[in-house]
Amino acid sequence: MIKSLQIRNYAIIEELEMNFSKGLTIVTGETGAGKSILLGALGLIMGKRADIKSLYNLEDKCVVEAHFDVSRYGLKQFFEENDLDYEDNMVIRREITPSGKSRAFVNDTPVTLNILQDLSSTLVDLHQQFDNLDIHQVSFQLRLLDALAENKGLLAEYQRGFTRYQANRRRLAELIRRNQSAARELDFINFQLEEFNAAALKAGEQEALEEELTRLSNAEDIKKILAGAFQQLSESEVSVISQLEEVAQALKSIRKFDPRLEQFFGRFDSVLVELNDLSQEFEGVAEETEHDPERIMQVQQRLDMIYRLENKHQVSSVEELLEIQESLQKQLDDIGDLSNEIAALEKEVARQEETLREQAEELSRRRHAVVGGFENKVEQMLGQLAMEHARIKAEFIRLEELGPTGLDEVNFLFAANLGSRMQMIKDVASGGELSRLTLVVKSLVASAIPLPTLIFDEIDTGISGDVALKMGNILRRLSNEHQVVSITHSPQIASKADVHYFVYKRVKEERTITELRNLELEERIHAIATMLSQSPPSDSAIANARELLSAG
């Protein structure tokens, strides 16, 4: 609950402090005295945008600080998740500098406005006319029915299971995606390996084939030239070898006459032997060399296949291709089939869904069981608040897929007047009607839903007399379980206060400022009497005020 609110240099507030009671705090004052300014300052605490125009003194910073007792709100996890120091007595502070810069703090730790909004929404429910109130929201309407149906335990169990179910569904989708991706990758690897296996590459074959192709392409020249060389060396009438043999015979006859001649003869004889060998090899190669167009085509095709694979895989040798083939085979061996894991998870997801659907059906049954009584009570209480013909209906929408709260969505339909068509609340209720409807609904579920501090701004618009008194009684009962703050013009509602603040204006140094006073008993009597009649109040108004307070 909120314990205190300090405001400095905001709008026409120079400086003031407001302390709040555990029960019902009432704020009254003349129109324009600054009651809405208090709510504006509180809005800063709740994370609303700041405006430099809000500064009372443009040369000083604006500071709004609120103290809360959060010991019953279970906020420790929120503080841990946002790296904040937790204390049961929490302080939220907003500062606006003259330059227009705004800063927010929780227990002196700077925070973003998003964090501040999330935190303050669990602490303060600020109900102002024409705001988008939570009663408009489908999530709140369903939450309300769950509270009346005492679904808290079952819903918590369902939501824990639903979280696991969603996680398993995401895991299953990921496994299927990975398996499909693996299957596509497997097909591609197999395709590449089939190409390599069909190629049956061998290390060194590219060089051998290139040499063979060169030889086959020049076979005719090789045969012609080697045959001619053999003929000139050995077969012609004046062959080179026959002439050299005559020289060898001549050298042989003189070799004994000079040691050098013996050496010459040996060297010459070696040349002659080598020429004879070469002549025979020339003849052999010439005889075995044939122009073979078919073999040329085979070799060329084989080389073309190798070149194509090298170009495809951006390498330049058969050895590199063989390394790629080995790598592809390893990848193939490493790819696992996820089918068994997928089948097991599909079975688990189906089991979870069956359990969740059973729980969702029970949640729905309980919701339907309480909705009739809820509608009747709301209509009865609205009748007491001068809305005798108001009707409300909870319209259920059945979902096909499981959701975070089961298989139900709910919309509250409302008609304020006799003969009016029932429509969604946000489309039909006026500010005053919506205020009364919200008060009635929240009072019915106050003990079932852990509502935060409730702040009502002029919820009494358009009502007076006995209706206002009944509204005051509702607020009073509501304050037995929750901290309630109400800004009102109604003396009947004001008479129900545990603490009564009066907002007024005074002139200070030629400037109008807002002041706040916590009224004592006689001051309350005078303020309520003034609200009943005029200023100064009549004796009868004072007597009436005393009667209202004694009845409160």
Image (cartoon, rainbow, N blue to C red):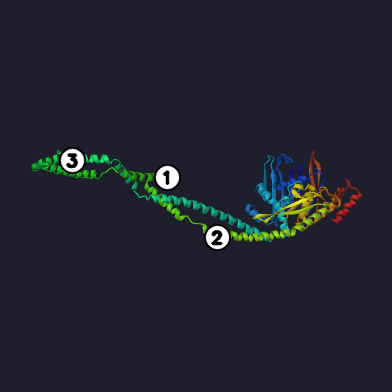
Residue at disc 3, secondary structure: helix
Q: How far across and down, in percent of the image, does residue 499 sit? A: 80, 53
Q: How far across and down, in percent of the image, does residue 170 sit? A: 58, 54
Q: Looking at the rendered structure, which numbered label has been put on residue 312? A: 1
CA separation, marks 1 and 2?
Answer: 41 Å
Q: Earlier in the sequence, mark 1 or mark 2?
A: 1
Q: Amino acid at mark 1?
A: Lys
CA separation, marks 3 and 1?
Answer: 51 Å
Q: Is label 3 in contact with label 1 (beta carbons under 8 Å)?
A: no
Q: Residues within 10 Å of mark 3 (few under 14, many from 20)?
A: many
Count numbered badges in the picture: 3
Residue at the disc numbered 3: 233
Name the image quarter holding the N terminus. bottom right
Name the image quarter holding the C terminus. bottom right
Please name whichever residue, 461 or 92, is drawn nearer the observer in this view of the structure. Answer: 461
Q: How far across and down, in percent of the image, does residue 372 sit? A: 76, 58
